[in-house]
Image (tube, rainbow, N blue to C red):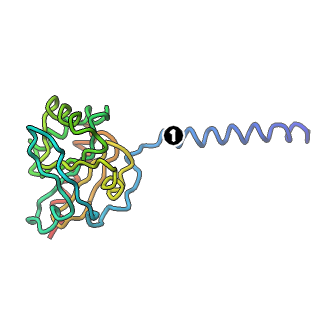
Amino acid sequence: MKRLILFSFPLLLLVGLVALFATQIYRDSSLIPSVLIDKPVPEFSLGPLESEGFPLPGFGTEDFQDRPEGEVTVVNVFASWCIPCRDEHEFLVRLTEEQNIRLFGINQRDAPENARTFLRELGNPYEAIGADTNNRASIEWGVYGVPETFVVNADGIITYKHIGPINAESYEQSLVPAIEAARGTSG
């Protein structure tokens, strides 16, 4: 009997570890907390996406200061090489059509010509796009990967973070309510 217990213990331990790892792999990544929630926008400055036909400015911390009460800025981190970014893009376009917000884009580690092609093909909903060629601003924002989306209130406080692509469900049930909540938290 002792021998059976002694030999089955490693097998039971292995089964337990496999079960633990399996449950962690399939966790909802949008539930990863951000240390930046309820904190000011980090210090950063991004130059514009160098492009012909996209005369949009870059942006930085100063663009979130001294904003009119109730104004909300949504910051979306994207890249042309990101397939989920392509999937969520229609919801960013919809956001600018349906909500009274400023939409800024952080173009992460992307060649300018690829970003231009991406935006020409899918449309450009951004008011400003900063080129994060060295990934430094993304680190300051606490970005895990692309796409990620942040809601910032008029006081420059990050009030919400969405990890992963925005879809119909997250648009209606999370992002739009987060924007409405951010409108009420400034001032």
20 lies left or right of 133: right
Position of the N terminus by quadrant: top right
Q: Residue at x 29, y 45 (%)?
A: 108
65 lies left or right of 169: left
Measured along the vertical axis of the image, is residue 94 above or below residue 66? above
Q: How far across and how far down the image is residue 47, in percent?
A: 19, 53
* Front residue of 33 and 51: 51
Q: Quadrant of the rendered structure where residue 126 is?
A: top left
Q: How far across and how far down the image is residue 89, in percent?
A: 21, 36
* Front residue of 4 and 151: 151
Measured along the vertical axis of the image, is residue 110 above or below residue 140? above
Q: How far across and how far down the image is residue 83, in percent?
A: 31, 31
Measured along the vertical axis of the image, is residue 68 above or below residue 13? below
Q: Quadrant of the rendered structure where residue 41 is?
A: bottom left
Q: Residue at x 21, y 63 (%)?
A: 61
Q: Which residue is mark 1?
A: 25
What's under tag 1, amino acid-wise?
Answer: Ile
62 lies left or right of 44: left
Measured along the vertical axis of the image, is residue 85 above or below residue 77? above
Q: Classify mark 1: helix, strand or loop.
A: helix
Toward the bottom, the furthest residue is 187
Q: Quadrant of the rendered structure where residue 151 is?
A: bottom left
Position of the C terminus by quadrant: bottom left
Q: Residue at x 41, y 51 (%)?
A: 32
* Front residue of 154 and 122: 122
Q: Residue at x 8, y 41 (%)?
A: 97
Q: How far across and how far down the image is residue 100, in percent?
A: 9, 51
Disc tally is 1
Please tell me how crowded label 1 is: few (under 14), some (14-19), or many (20+) other residues with Cα within 10 Å. Answer: few
120 lies left or right of 18: left
